[in-house]
Image (cartoon, helix red, strand yellow):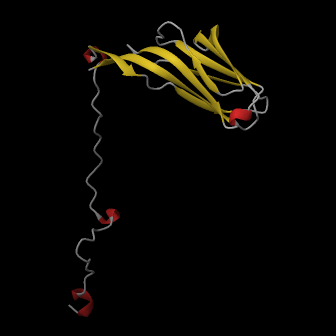
Amino acid sequence: MGLVGRLTARRPRGLHPYAASLPARGAQVLRIPRVPVEAYTRHLTGLLLTGGQAQGIIPASGNLTLSVGPQGLGNVWYPVQVTLSTTTGLFDGSTVNVYLGAQGVPVTLVGTQFGGNGTIALAIPPMTPGQVLITSWTGAKTGDTAALNILGTMDALSA
């Protein structure tokens, strides 16, 4: 063996070989364990309401509708207020109507906010999956980001 056969590439201590240089071991597929729905038997009450946020960009028409509501088996929302905002802020001349509806269809007007920003107190019954709060901005500035945040408590199921 000549000089070339005795030279091998050496890696400094701590440097690992490239992933492509490792031997192929075959792909292993591991399933993510799932919990059957029957295991969700604990009823949790009085949790802070989560998932009650939505936002969107005001289109050229100046009108935007956003909706949000409880999702999932056993979730019940008890909302107490909705906070509305646009990026224009205090100088926004839009009007926001808040409705309680079912499956995206406004049914009951629960509040109106002039100026597109502010807080509306809610006095509505508990919301279950399928019911939504629908906010509708009219006359808003094109390109603004409009957002809503619902505060309250909720019930949920746990395994």
Q: Which quarter of the picture shows residue 97? A: top right
Q: 156 or 91: which is nearer to us?
A: 91
- Horizontally, residue 129 falls left or right of residue 30, namely right
Name the quadrant of the N terminus: bottom left
Q: 22 or 35: which is nearer to us?
A: 35
Q: Is residue 72 visible?
A: no
Quick one: which residue is furthest to the bottom in this view? 3
- Horizontally, residue 131 falls left or right of residue 110, namely left
Query: Percent x, y for residue 72?
Result: 42, 18
Q: Residue at x 47, y 9 (%)?
A: 126
Query: Percent x, y for residue 93?
Result: 77, 28
Query: Percent x, y for residue 20?
Result: 34, 63
Q: Is residue 105 visible?
A: yes
- Horizontally, residue 83 falls left or right of residue 23, namely right
Query: Percent x, y for residue 86?
Result: 66, 33
Q: Report the number of numbered marks.
A: 0
Q: Residue at x 61, y 15 (%)?
A: 104
Against 105, is 28 above or below?
A: below
Q: Residue at x 50, y 16 (%)?
A: 80
Q: 76 or 40: which is nearer to us?
A: 76
